[in-house]
């Protein structure tokens, strides 16, 4: 019998984004490599938020400053 | 849904055993290719169209390592260079057919679709079990009359097992176990993991492994877009864990491998293989796994062929609904979209959503 577990993650793969389906709920829990987390019931919305890094990933300061839309004149509010 | 495929990528074109001294015709990503082996055993892939009058070279004949067109006798070497034309001594300088980069690895013949300068065999993802002496493998290939993206969706969401494959591989737990999805953007991998703990042992596993009582059953999907899909399946007595160093000799493993190769925009080569590290010499286990997996693949083929007819006739912009079970499939679609944008030099690379 093969002696080793074969998952590539043990061979140096790195996780950029992780989404856990929270046990016993309909909630998805997303985590970005930067440490930002978010819960959502919609996988499409959650991937948009995760892959939009860093937009909205630092609640204190990032969202508006980093949002490229603000650079082309779309009002953020 | 975009039906394009990523270019500048390696795709599985065939099993090594399919490529021989007989000419094999196969379309990969819309490109007609003829495969054969030279007398020294090297696999060769050439464009399947004579430069003269476009005859299928696959309907021609080998003369040693030379391919002689069955229509007028244009003769090509294994580099695709025309070395002889009928009735005249001068061979036109432009008389050559495209030679595709090919690599034989892990029992597959991989072919590079895209710009030859970018082809690096080191980029080919591995499925080492298939050609290993320590594993026993059964395999097959089914033609799918559906776009490859539908097979990607299908394989990334195993919760369909309960419904489409009930009684074969589906068990109630499969639809009721939480799922973790991870994306490795640097290496281009989507992981979808489901670890069922303390569940009943399906009769097949009890018989072939000798496990008595309940089991932990892990299913770890590792998808390396666009072509290679691995399902690491692990069965162990409840509570038996792999060691911190990766040692997992207390468990039984099945490595399910799919190669998802577009044939055309709306058809796909569905390669499947099942390797195991237990009951390795037991022919009845091989027969069961081959029959069972082929049945499961054909159930998917039937469903996806039907789905293709629905999608092909629907008005543009039709919306579908995604729920939690689709998390992995959505991650795969994003990665494929990025690959399509990266390999597409004729269009602005702004179509990807990643
Ligand atoms: Fe299936
Ligand atoms: Zn982030």
Image: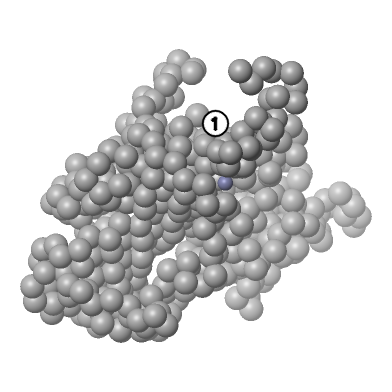
x, y percent for residue B152 = 43, 45
Q: Quick check: B351 above or below B164? A: above
The residue where tag 1 is placed is B2
Residue at 63% in and 37% down: A61
In the figure, is residue B118 to the left or right of B125? right
x, y percent for residue B155 = 37, 49
Query: What colouring style does the render use?
Result: one colour
Residue at 48% in and 68% down: A8
Residue at 20% in and 74% down: B239
In the figure, is residue A10 to the left or right of B188? left
In the figure, is residue A13 to the left or right of B310? right
Q: Quadrant of residue B309?
A: top left
Counting every numbered tag in the picture gives: 1
Q: Badge 1: few (under 14), some or many (20 or more) residues near its Cα, within 10 Å?
A: few
Residue B335 visible to an observer of this rendering: yes
Residue B208 visible to an observer of this rendering: no
Q: Is mark 1 within 8 Å of ligand 1?
A: no
Q: Quick check: A20 above or below B196? A: above
x, y percent for residue B340 = 62, 41
Q: Quadrant of the C terminus of chain B?
A: top right
Q: Quick check: A22 above or below B351? A: below
Looking at the image, which is closer to me, B41 or B196? B196
Query: What chain does mark 1 sit on?
Result: B
Looking at the image, which is closer to me, B20 or B91? B20
In the figure, is residue B289 to the left or right of B142? left
Residue at 22% in and 45% down: A24
Where disc 1 sits, the SS reads loop
Looking at the image, which is closer to me, B98 or B263? B263
x, y percent for residue B332 = 48, 45
Direction front: furthest residue: A60
């Amino acid at each position: 019998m093969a002696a080793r577990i074969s998952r590539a993650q043990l061979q140096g793969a790195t996780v950029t984004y992780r989404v856990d389906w929270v046990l016993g709920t309909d909630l998805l829990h997303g985590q970005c490599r930067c440490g930002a987390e978010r819960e959502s019931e919609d996988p499409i919305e959650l991937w948009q938020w995760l892959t939009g890094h860093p937009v909205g990933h630092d609640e204190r300061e990032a969202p508006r400053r980093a949002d490229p839309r603000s650079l082309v004149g779309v009002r953020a509010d | 849904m975009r039906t394009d495929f990523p270019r500048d990528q390696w795709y599985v074109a065939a099993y090594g055993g399919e490529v021989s001294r007989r000419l094999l015709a196969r379309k990969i990503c819309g490109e007609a290719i003829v495969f054969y082996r030279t007398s020294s055993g090297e696999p060769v892939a050439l464009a399947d169209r004579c430069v003269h009058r476009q005859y299928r070279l696959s309907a021609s004949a080998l003369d040693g390592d030379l391919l002689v067109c069955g229509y007028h006798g244009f003769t090509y070497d294994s580099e695709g260079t025309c070395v002889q034309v009928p009735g005249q001594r001068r061979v036109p300088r432009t008389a050559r057919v495209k030679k595709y980069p090919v690599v034989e690895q892990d029992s597959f013949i991989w072919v590079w679709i895209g710009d030859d300068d970018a082809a690096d065999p080191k980029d080919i993802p591995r499925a080492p079990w298939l050609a290993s002496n320590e594993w026993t493998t059964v395999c097959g290939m089914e033609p799918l009359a559906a776009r490859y993206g539908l097979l990607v969706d299908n394989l990334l969401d195993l919760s369909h097992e309960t419904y489409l494959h009930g009684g074969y591989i589906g068990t109630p737990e499969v639809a009721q176990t939480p799922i973790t999805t991870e994306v490795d953007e640097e290496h281009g991998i989507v992981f979808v993991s489901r670890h069922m703990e303390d569940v009943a042992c399906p009769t097949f596993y009890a018989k072939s492994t000798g496990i008595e009582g309940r089991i932990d059953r892990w299913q770890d999907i590792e998808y390396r877009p666009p072509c290679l899909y691995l399902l690491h399946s692990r069965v162990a007595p409840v509570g038996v864990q792999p060691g911190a160093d990766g040692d997992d000799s207390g468990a039984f493993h099945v490595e399910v491998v799919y190669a998802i190769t577009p044939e055309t925009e709306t058809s796909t080569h569905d390669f499947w293989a099942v390797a195991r590290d237990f009951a390795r010499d037991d022919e009845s286990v091989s027969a069961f796994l081959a029959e069972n997996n082929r049945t499961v693949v054909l159930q998917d083929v039937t469903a996806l062929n039907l789905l293709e007819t629905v999608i092909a006739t629907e008005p543009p912009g039709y919306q579908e609904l995604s729920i939690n079970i689709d998390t992995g499939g959505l991650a795969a679609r994003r990665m494929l979209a990025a690959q399509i944008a990266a390999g597409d030099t004729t269009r602005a690379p702004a179509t990807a959503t990643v």
